[in-house]
Image (tube, rainbow, N blue to C red):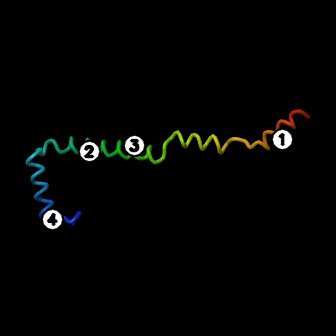
Amino acid sequence: MVGGLGTPELLIILFLFFMLFGIERLPKMARSMGQARGEFSKGLKDVVDPPELKEGFNDVSTSKTEDETVSKTEDEKE
């Protein structure tokens, strides 16, 4: 049972699908639906976790603090 549909209902839907589109178009449609799903998932991932924010966080985490910079500069003067 899928989403409230039993086996007889799914068979009727499958039969109507084949009557409308034909069995020879099924692989092409499945391939295009898979590609669309992949692109959608990729786009959703970019919206949830944008790459430009990741780069910004990496820059912040590797930057030096003011105290480290001052102490390094004072060591170089000596």
Identity, as a three-letter code, of the amino acid under mark 1: Ser
Query: Which numbered circle lies on residue 23?
Result: none
**Contact check, label 2 and label 1, Cβ < 8 Å:** no
Please identify, in this view, whether the residue under mark 2 or under mark 1 is nearer the observer: 1
Q: Residue 24's spot in the image, x, y percent? A: 13, 42
List the single residue furthest toward the left.
Answer: 19
The CA span between labels 2 and 1 is: 59 Å
Q: Which residue is mark 4?
A: 7
Assign a secondary structure to mark 2. Answer: helix
The answer to which of marks 2 and 1 sits earlier in the sequence is 2
Q: Which residue is mark 3?
A: 43
Q: Which residue is mark 2?
A: 33
Q: Which residue is mark 1?
A: 71
Identity, as a three-letter code, of the amino acid under mark 2: Met
Q: Counting other residues with Cα less than 10 Å from the Cα at mark 2, is it few (<14), some (14-19), or many (20 or more)?
A: few
**Contact check, label 3 and label 2, Cβ < 8 Å:** no
Q: Counting other residues with Cα less than 10 Å from the Cα at mark 1, is it few (<14), some (14-19), or many (20 or more)?
A: few
In the picture, residue 33 is in which quadrant?
Answer: top left
In the picture, residue 21 is in which quadrant?
Answer: top left
Identity, as a three-letter code, of the amino acid under mark 3: Gly
List the single residue furthest toward the top.
Answer: 77
Which quadrant does the C terminus fall into?
top right
Up/down of 4 relative to 18, above or below: below
